[in-house]
Image: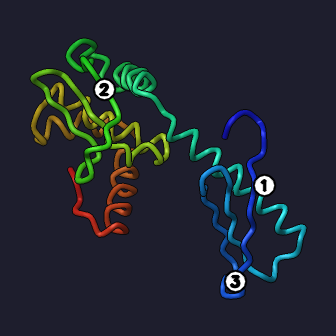
């Protein structure tokens, strides 16, 4: 959202909607969908809550390649400290042309690409995907040594489960 100015909000009430509330941008305005039985006070509370959620989501989407490189450097320091130069990528960036993978790495030119689909995910999942790709700079294959490096991340199993759930929910194949 630009500055601190509140956007134009259109509230749509639905008799079919019972408990759920959702919101989306439609050009310059925000459309908030609420149950018809909500009071004006509940409507106001939910509009504020949904505007905050949209702002948080848009902030996550604004993550930059520079932030991704800084995150990679931090992860190297934390989990791959004995490989300070080998694990350092020449480039790391968000890409929009990867829909079948969460990320990819080309060890030959030391480049890492992370799918834009990951941008909206929690930080600990982004860290996992990025650490997975950094580990490929050290070990190109998915062998035991590779998984031992990835396994240093304390939330590795949790992040893999999260990604498997996202893939299952979207009926997509499970990328490795």
Q: Residue at x 27, y 21 (%)?
A: 91
Instruction: Estimate the x, y position of residue 72 in percent, counting from the top left.
Output: 36, 25
The residue indicated by pointer 3 is: 18
* Residue at the extreme top of the image, as rendered: 85
Distance CA(mark 2)–CA(mark 1): 36 Å
Q: Is residue 143 above or below residue 71?
A: below
Residue visible at 37% across and 63% down in the picture? 165
* Residue 23, position as x, y percentages in the image: 64, 62
| Closest to the observer, 12 or 28 | 28
Question: Which residue is denoted by mark 1 in the rendering?
Answer: 48
Residue 107: x percent and y percent?
13, 26
Q: Label 3 crowding class (10 Å Cα cut-off): few <14, some 14-19, many 20+?
A: few
- For marks 1 and 3 on the same chain, the one whose residue lies earlier in the sequence: 3
Q: Residue at x 78, y 45 (%)?
A: 6
User: Residue 43's quadrant in the figure?
Assistant: bottom right
**What label does residue 92 carry, if any?**
2
Q: 71 or 16: nearer the eye?
A: 16
């Amino acid at each position: 959202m630009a500055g601190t100015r509140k956007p134009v909000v259109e509230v749509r009430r639905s008799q079919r909607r019972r408990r759920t509330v959702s919101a989306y941008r439609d050009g310059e305005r925000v459309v908030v969908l609420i149950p018809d039985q909500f009071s004006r006070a509940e409507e106001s509370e939910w509009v504020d809550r949904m505007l905050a959620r949209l702002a948080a989501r848009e902030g996550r989407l604004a993550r930059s390649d520079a932030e991704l490189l800084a995150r990679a450097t931090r992860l190297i320091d934390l989990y791959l400290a004995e490989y300070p130069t080998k694990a350092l990528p020449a480039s790391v960036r968000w890409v929009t042309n990867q829909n079948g993978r969460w990320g990819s790495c080309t060890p030959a030119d030391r480049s890492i690409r992370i799918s834009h689909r990951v941008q909206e995910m929690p930080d600990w999942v982004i860290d996992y995907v990025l650490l997975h790709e950094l580990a490929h700079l050290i070990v190109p294959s998915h062998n035991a040594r590779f998984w031992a490096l990835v396994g240093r991340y304390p939330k590795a199993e949790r992040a893999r489960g999260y990604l498997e759930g996202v893939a299952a929910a979207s009926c997509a194949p499970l990328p490795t």
